[in-house]
Image (spheres, coloured by chain):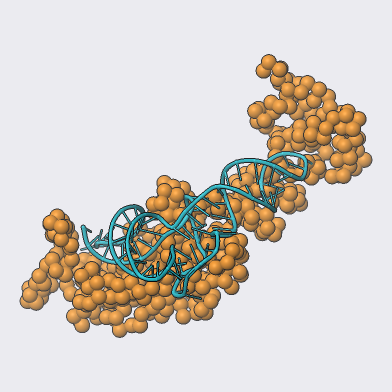
Amino acid sequence: MRFAPSPTGFLHVGGARTAIYNELLRKSLGGAHILRIEDTDKERSDDAMTRQIIEALAWLGIEVDEGPFLQSANLQDHTAAAQRLLAEDKAYHCFRTAEELDEKRKEILGRGDSYRYKTAFDPPPREEVERRLEAGEPYVVRFRMPDEAIVVEDIVRGDVHFPEESLDDFIILRSDRTPTYHLSVVCDDISMGVTHVIRGEDHLSNTPKHIGLFRALGADLPRFGHLPLILGADKKRLSKRTGATSVEEFRAQGILPQALYNYLCLLGWSPGDDRELMDRAELIEAFTAERLGKTHGVFDVDKLKWMNSHYMASTPLDEILEHLAPFLEEAGLADADPELLRHVVELHQGRSKNLVELAEGIRHYFQESLEYDLEATKKFRKQPELPEMLETLATRYAELDDYTVESTEKAMRDLIAELDVKLGVLIHPTRFALSGSKAGPPLFDLVVPVGRERGQRRFADFIRFLRENPVTPEG
RNA sequence: GCCCCUAUCGUCUAGCCAGGUUAGGACACCAGCCUUUCAAGCUGGCGACACGGGUUCGAAUCCCGUUGGGGGUACCA
């Protein structure tokens, strides 16, 4: 039992979702999950893309049992199949040029009729075909679609009827003798013993063609399932205009693979109860093809972000560290002290929405000087007595026997009691002085990793800054 | 144009197949609580059965139509 996703180009989130459902289905039915790269269009596919797709699938944690196979490796088989169909008169030579076809189509559509190659042209007499063949005239090979309606028994949509008039003879061999997608797919599916074809809805109207081919080639039909497409916020097909579309882009945005996996899985499927945050094991356990939805889903970036925040907080530290590595490199923190890194990542992972934010948030622990956002300092600069208070605090911190969460907190609480001010009066400027930010982990948790020495320097810097840039009541 | 798919809060969806619910959950948004900041968390609020006909005592649920959205209509996949 096998499944075949057919990704082309970069890995679109729609393709990723198809791969996820394929994997989940394979887990529930057994069999093998095949990865086949559909690269029959040599113009549009290149090795870099192929590697990118394989890499993206691996990153998402999708297991592939067989492959990756390249469809282009089997072209001779596909061509041979076309010859067989030709010999059995299930396909025929067509000498009409693309321009001729276009013209005819335009003419027929122009008078409001529906175009069909089958009925638009009379087949040339056999002798003429022979003659032109011998003369070496260019031709394509068309599959002779049987004159009958075709019913697609779709896993997600039920029976879909295609009337005979909507079916046409289509090209299986181009004039350069290369097989087209339709032929290649069916040949490979047959030779690989594919039993389930789960793909995007954009292939639904191709399916009658494929069924025709399967039957003509004397093969059993696989089960088909067509998934609704993913739309952008504008309800149009998800495109770069509306935002990120590829797995790679979300990865670069600091999204965790388990978040994207979970989100994508729930876009078009639900376990039937109220569960939403589900890991791979739960999804495998709960997945059934019957619950696959039929309606187009709008990709909701906000919900993905929410899910990602959840996974940022719940993913084990070591795993976060692993995923964070490339972002650290980008932030210039590639050789950060591992021990300090572990400590601050633990402090920050739960309050970061994504890996980019996390890397940014812990940056200051690994650099010497801070840059102040002027607007953020305004409130502090309005308090003329603040520099002196901070000075006192810094002195106390310098004199502490040991520099811990407890000792620094106690020192500050003692000081505010002496000064008879509220805790907030000291705690906020201290946070800013030590981290350059108004937000972050609980103050005394960050005091220690910043360190006493560096903390002293940062106090001094900030105090000097306050004195040099006071804000008078008038502004 | 023609063929195919589809229709529940702004978004993802449960409920539909086996008609009777205050139509449930989540994201987003709003308010409150908590709080040393920011998040998180907790509580509450907002908000939907596309429309029109049937069938029925009763329709989100079954049938027909309309409208909307999507896909296809290639010597692309």
Percent position (x, y) of residue B54?
A: 33, 66
The foreground one among A125 and A302 is A302
The foreground one among A459 and A15 is A15
Q: How many marks?
A: 0
Q: Is residue A266 above or below residue A33?
A: above
The answer to whether residue A122 is left or right of residue A416 is: left
The structure residue drawn at horizontal position 38% and vertical position 73%, both measured from the top left corner, is: A158
Percent position (x, y) of residue A357?
A: 62, 45
Image hue for chain A: orange
Q: In this view, does A348 lie above or below A466?
A: below
Can residue A181 be seen in this snapshot?
A: no
Q: Is residue A390 above or below residue A384?
A: below
The answer to whether residue A27 is left or right of residue A311 is: left
The foreground one among A110 and A50 is A110
Percent position (x, y) of residue A269?
A: 50, 65
The foreground one among A195 and A266 is A266
The structure residue drawn at horizontal position 38% and vertical position 60%, both measured from the top left corner, is: A45
The structure residue drawn at horizontal position 84% and vertical position 27%, both measured from the top left corner, is: A389
